[in-house]
Image (tube, rainbow, N blue to C red):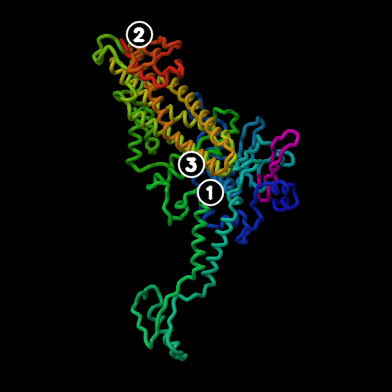
């Protein structure tokens, strides 16, 4: 049995060296906190149930990355285990609920991977963490797991003595500060949980044994037995029962009524109980109002949609991300991954959803049938066509580039076109600024939260470059694609042609990824110098906060302007090229330009050729080939000629 193994087995030394254990430890409230006892505290049960159930109810999917493209990979042989049936006895939704439940209560969850003779996973079997003992092979440092199943557990374990290697065991960890196991939220906050349990027990016994009267009738002198019985009977007949409340009370012989209240100590204890609920909600990162504590104001937003968004981003997503990253080990291929879809929790009201759908259709990244599928409506004929903003024609219906500017076409407006300046696109600069600033702010919040737990953590530990690069790449790519679509179409229309934005997707994706990697690498370097002050934790946090505050303002604005300038030049160049422009001319718009740019002014080259600017060559202003010295602060534009 697990308890016997803990008493006589080999786990005592490991637990003695670890942070406070979950089992068998008393608290200042005189309560020994165990998982079963902790779940009897309403706030603990509500928090665990909320996170486990909302996480397990979300749709899951398996996808494959190919460059900037994400394609469904539901035909993968492992996909059914994660999305439909984890094993013959357990469907996928209940599987994820069990895994999340163990992580939330014990800080760890284990899943045994059943494999076929060919090594392919054929079943996923959750194992109670009390039946798992992580071990390390001294010679190699390899992590293995000793599984000793209890009587009511079963899994098709093939390994001798239950010693399972890491590739056949998924170990889901909650937050931890080293070691092979995650920290139990309940174990680390046992004092608050114990106080909550004691408060709950005290309140129950208070109502069970309390003999405090609701009020007192006092009379001068001493009543005879007959007078006492008459007064008591008369008072009950007139006022006892909810249907007789607030009736007129007639007092005689100098009798007076005095209402009693809770003692100050009892009233204060009830306040402690209420405060403990909010503390327990904070342990699990759950907004108090979602577990019934609605007495205090919330900063999670004013509407249901905003509150749901805050819950998904700050409470649920960290747990889902841990599930995804650990599960991805099953695929053995970094391009294939599991993804939980929280969109079902973020649905706004009808007007907001339809406004979002309209924008998605207008900008060509969702078709009518994709929108109808999200509303559980059947597809319609012709609903798989994507539209583009210029004239809402079917995407890709434009003529080939060589035929887009044939002489004599009626829609041709002019023989030349110019690149718009960033000043002519203030809304795009603001849109870039807001998105980049929000990314920096969220990144800063994560860093500060991590510093609060581990004040001596390094910059590399505080920032997950892989995840942040992917997130920022997606933000920059979507912005660049939309801006390119607008500017490219406008330039093409000026020259009498049309523009297909999909022909630029690969270039935009590479550029976004490169910029994201550079930005986040710079952030890590800046953070490394900021927190390496050998100062007190509070001063380190203050320095980091000031750093990210500056990034959300000045750095985000500079980056926004640079991205708009670079993308605008590229988009107008592609729009002109697709419309059949034959040459391009470098134009200087600065009253005091660089000497290299002044010498390049008026230089005309073929549309596919490069300009000579100083000692470098570039296809357009802000082309990365020109180098930082020629790009920074540049306001030059291009003129395109048919």
Question: Foreground residue, 380 or 559?
Answer: 559
Residue 500 x/y as whole percent? 36, 19
Question: Foreground residue, 306 or 20?
Answer: 20
Q: Is residue 68 visible?
A: no
| Residue plotted at (45% across, 10% down) | 615
Question: Which quadrant, please, contains the C terminus?
Answer: top left
Image check: 80 left or right of 587? right
Do the residues bearing badges 3 and 1 touch, measured as CB atoms within 8 Å? no
Q: Which residue is mark 2?
A: 604
Q: Which residues are magenta?
A: 132-154
Residue 102 x/y as whole percent? 59, 47
Q: Which residue is mark 3?
A: 58
* Magenta run includes residue 413: no
Helix or strand or loop: what does disc 2 sit on?
strand
Residue 567, quarter of the rendered image: top left
Helix or strand or loop: what does disc 1 sit on?
loop
Q: Is residue 465 above or below residue 284?
A: above
Q: Earlier in the sequence, mark 3 or mark 1?
A: 3
Residue 6 x/y as whole percent? 71, 51
Question: Foreground residue, 487 or 114?
Answer: 487
* Magenta run includes residue 135: yes
Q: Which mark is residue 284?
A: 1
């Amino acid at each position: 049995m697990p308890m016997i193994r803990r008493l006589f087995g080999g786990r005592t030394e490991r637990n003695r060296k670890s942070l406070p254990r979950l089992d068998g430890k008393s608290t200042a409230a005189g309560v020994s906190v165990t998982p079963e006892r902790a779940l009897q505290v309403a706030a603990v049960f509500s928090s665990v149930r909320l996170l486990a159930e909302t996480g397990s109810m979300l749709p899951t999917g398996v996808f494959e990355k190919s460059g900037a493209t994400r394609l469904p990979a539901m035909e993968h042989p492992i996909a059914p285990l994660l999305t439909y049936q984890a094993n013959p006895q357990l469907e996928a939704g209940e599987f994820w609920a069990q895994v999340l439940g163990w992580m939330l209560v014990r800080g760890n969850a284990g899943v045994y991977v059943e494999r076929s003779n060919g090594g392919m996973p054929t079943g996923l079997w959750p194992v109670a963490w009390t039946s798992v003992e992580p071990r390390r092979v001294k010679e190699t440092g390899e992590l293995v797991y000793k599984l000793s199943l209890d009587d009511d557990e079963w899994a098709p374990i093939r390994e001798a003595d239950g010693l399972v290697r890491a590739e056949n065991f998924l170990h889901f960890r909650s937050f931890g500060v080293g070691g092979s196991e995650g920290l139990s939220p309940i174990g680390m906050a046992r004092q608050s949980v114990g106080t909550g349990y004691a408060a709950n027990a005290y309140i129950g016994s208070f109502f069970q044994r309390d003999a405090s009267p609701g009020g007192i009738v006092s009379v001068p002198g001493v009543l005879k037995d007959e007078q006492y019985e008459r007064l008591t009977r008369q008072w009950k007949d007139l006022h006892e029962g909810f249907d007789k409340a607030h009736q007129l009370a007639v007092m005689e012989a100098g009798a007076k009524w005095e209402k009693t209240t809770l003692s100050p100590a009892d009233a204060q204890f009830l306040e402690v109980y209420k405060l403990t609920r909010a503390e327990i909600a904070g342990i699990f990162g759950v907004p108090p109002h979602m577990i019934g504590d609605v007495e205090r104001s919330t900063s999670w937003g004013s509407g249901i949609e905003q509150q749901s968004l805050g819950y998904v981003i700050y409470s649920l997503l960290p747990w889902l991300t841990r599930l995804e990253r650990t599960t991805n080990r099953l695929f053995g291929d970094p391009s294939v991954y599991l993804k939980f879809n929280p969109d079902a929790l973020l649905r706004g009201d009808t007007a907001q959803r339809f406004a979002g759908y309209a924008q998605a259709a207008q900008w060509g990244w969702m078709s009518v049938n994709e929108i109808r599928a999200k509303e559980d409506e059947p597809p319609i004929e012709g609903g798989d066509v994507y539209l583009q903003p210029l004239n809402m024609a079917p995407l890709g219906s434009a003529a080939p580039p060589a035929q887009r500017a044939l002489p004599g076409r009626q829609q041709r407006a002019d023989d030349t076109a110019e690149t718009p300046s960033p000043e002519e696109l203030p809304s795009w600069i603001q849109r870039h600024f807001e998105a980049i600033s929000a990314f920096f702010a969220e990144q800063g919040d994560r860093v500060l939260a991590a510093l609060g737990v581990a004040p001596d953590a390094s910059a590399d530990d505080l920032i997950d470059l892989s995840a942040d690069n992917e997130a920022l790449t997606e933000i920059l790519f979507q912005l660049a694609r939309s801006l390119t679509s607008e500017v490219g179409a406008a330039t093409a229309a000026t020259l009498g042609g049309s523009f297909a934005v999909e022909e630029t997707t690969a270039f935009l994706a590479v550029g976004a990824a490169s910029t994201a990697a550079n930005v986040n690498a710079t952030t890590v370097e800046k953070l490394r110098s900021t927190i390496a002050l050998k100062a007190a934790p509070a001063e380190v946090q203050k320095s980091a906060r000031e750093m990210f505050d500056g990034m959300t303002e000045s750095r985000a604005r500079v980056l926004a302007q640079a991205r708009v300038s670079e993308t605008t030049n590229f988009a107008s160049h592609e729009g002109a090229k697709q419309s059949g422009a034959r040459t391009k001319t470098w134009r200087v718009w600065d009253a005091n330009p660089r000497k290299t740019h002044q010498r390049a002014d008026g230089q005309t080259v073929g549309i596919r050729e490069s300009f000579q600017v100083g000692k470098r060559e570039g296809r357009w202003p802000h082309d990365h080939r020109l180098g930082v010295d020629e790009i920074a602060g540049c306001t030059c534009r291009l003129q395109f000629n048919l």
